[in-house]
Image (cartoon, grey):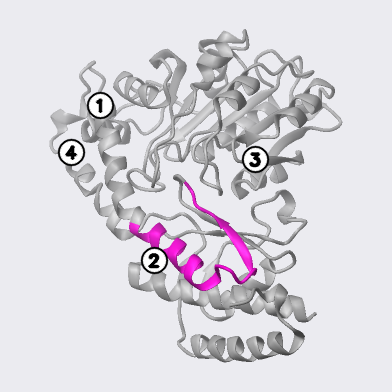
Amino acid sequence: MKSYQEMTREELQAQRETLSQSYSRLQAKGLKLNMARGKPGADQLALSAPLLDVLGTQTNCVTESGIDCRNYGELLGIPEARKLFGDYMGVAPEETIVVGSASLTFMYDCMARAMLLGVLGGDRPWSKYDKVKFLCPVPGYDRHFTICESLGIEMINIPLTEWGPDMDLVEQLVAGDETIKGIWCVPKFTNPLGGSYSDGAVRRLAALKPAAKDFRIFWDNAYAGHYVYEDTPVLNILEECKKADNPDLVYIFGSTSKITFPGAGVAFFGASKANVDFTARQLNAQSISWDKMNMLRHVLFFKDLDGIRSQLDKHAALLRPKFDEVLAALEDELGGTGAGSWVKPKGGYFVTYIAMPGCAKRIVSLCKEAGVVLTDAGATHPYHNDPEDSYIRLAPSFPSPAELAVAMEVFCTTAKLAAVEKLLG
């Protein structure tokens, strides 16, 4: 088959007629399918069902270190949880705080506290500057951008390459502007491309010399264990910061939201001991303690780092066939058409489709009208402004295999239809 770009106008018109008929048949099915967010499927949630029963009797509410998890105290988390999730992040227990149920909440809190109270090394709260700016690798994670936008923080796009952010641009910008207070990073697996930062990118980030003394790397490890095809290692950012004499430069965030139960997992924070102590003093005004019963449940369920890795292996086994389905559909239906391209991820929860420029919003709209909900076009960029109107994030995890096959039929039909419409003007 010719690519659409090689077709005559008459051939394109014939394609549009055929695709419009196919689309009308799909619309008539009255579908209600959701591929909008990286929600674990029911089979993945079932993996953690034993977590609900691990406490059993009241005697199991006391940790090995003698802490009664039913009561107040331990603002930084129970020692057993700090050890377990510190191991998972690659930091020491004293460099770890175990907090609530969602890392996104703690990211927002860290940003809000920085705006109101400042961070270690700063001479004033961020809000006391005329402007506060943040670097945002794109395509990136819409929730990060929402945090900045909600707090009035100006976002600056940084191209995301296959090995990490454009570090030449990052180094140039942070060196000359003290109002640039940080950068968002999803090092493994990048949201939405599903790649991993190279050793060189991690080392250059760790060695940054920002004009702002209170600059922070917000290192979101939400997807770090979620390999699908290849568990690519990434350098330990805190260790690299220490080597570069920048121990306080990074905040590390993670959670079990996609390992156990989203919204009912355990979130954790990693940083230098100085940052942890500084954050603890701020937290003391915010809370007396977090949900230690949930921390204990997770410690008893996982037992150790090998227990977490075993659980992640089970998730990968369930996710891989769904990713295979999406990638096969894209290749079979769109390969050679010129309608767009896509990225095969190593891990994470998404497949990124890069549509013909000017087509992403049309594809998402057509899918919605046919009963398939996708993340809004533009969500991969700050202010929902994808200048090429090209990036679409597909989330295969939530639908059943049968639903996923139908959803991809709808998606591929709309991707072709939007491309043909665009070429016809």
Q: Position of residue 312 (x, y in %)?
A: 31, 41
Nearest the viewer among 224 and 343 is 343
**Label 1 SS:** loop
Q: Residues within 10 Å of mark 4 (few under 14, many from 20)?
A: some
**Residue 220 visible:** yes
Determine which of the numbered discs, if any, sits on residue 304 in the image.
1
For the N terminus, the quadrant is: bottom right
Determine which of the numbered discs, if any, sits on residue 161 in the image.
3
Mark 1 residue type: Asp
Determine which of the numbered discs, if any, sits on residue 206 in the image.
none
Q: Earlier in the sequence, mark 4 or mark 3?
A: 4
Mark 4 and mark 2: Cα distance apart in space: 29 Å
Q: Earlier in the sequence, mark 1 or mark 2?
A: 1
**Residue 398 visible:** no
Which residue is label 4 attached to?
54
Q: Earlier in the sequence, mark 3 or mark 1?
A: 3
Image quadrant where residue 64 sits:
top left
Mark 3 and mark 1: Cα distance apart in space: 34 Å
Q: Taking 160 as reference, is 35 above or below it?
A: below
Determine which of the numbered discs, if any, sits on residue 399 in the image.
2
